[in-house]
């Protein structure tokens, strides 16, 4: 864990009077969700790219 994450966890624990472990889990979960969103966005972009490629092939062939 990066030292800035440790500082963030400590500050949030003090501010909201929460367990540091719980905050750590929430941060990790948000990282996982963010990674999944990026992965999904790349997949959608690849699909759109393929669609545009095949559409351009079809219009060139006509």
Image: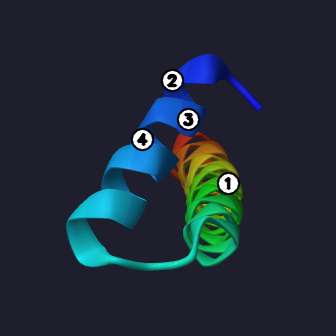
Question: How crowded is the residue under tag 1: few (<14 C-alpha within 10 Å), some, or many (20+)?
Answer: few
Answer left or right for 23 relative to 54. Answer: left
Answer left or right for 60 relative to 17. Answer: right
The answer to whether mark 2 and mark 4 are in CB contact below 8 A is yes
Element at label 4: helix
Question: How crowded is the residue under tag 3: few (<14 C-alpha within 10 Å), some, or many (20+)?
Answer: few
Q: Tell which of 25 and 34 is nearer to you.
A: 25
Element at label 3: helix
Q: Quadrant of residue 23?
A: bottom right
| Distance of label 3 from label 2 (alpha carbons) | 4 Å
| Distance of label 1 from label 2 (alpha carbons) | 20 Å
Which mark sits nearer the N-terminus, 1 or 3? 3
Residue 39, given in percent of the width and then of the height, sits at 71, 55
The answer to whether mark 1 and mark 2 are in CB contact below 8 A is no
Element at label 1: helix
| Distance of label 1 from label 3 (alpha carbons) | 17 Å
The N terminus lies in quadrant: top right
* Residue that numbered label 2 is attached to: 4
Q: Residue at x 46, y 47 (%)?
A: 10
Q: In this rendering, which labeled residue sits more in front, label 1 or label 3?
A: 3
Q: Residue furthest left?
A: 15
| Distance of label 2 from label 4 (alpha carbons) | 6 Å
| Distance of label 4 from label 1 (alpha carbons) | 20 Å
* Residue that numbered label 1 is attached to: 35
* Residue that numbered label 3 is attached to: 5
Q: Residue at x 59, y 65 (%)?
A: 20
């Amino acid at each position: 864990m990066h030292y800035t994450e440790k500082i963030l966890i400590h500050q949030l624990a003090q501010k909201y009077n929460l367990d540091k472990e719980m905050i750590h889990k929430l941060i990790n979960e948000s990282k996982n969700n963010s990674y999944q969103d990026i992965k999904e966005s790349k997949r959608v972009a690849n699909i759109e790219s393929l669609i545009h490629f095949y559409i351009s092939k079809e219009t060139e062939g006509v």
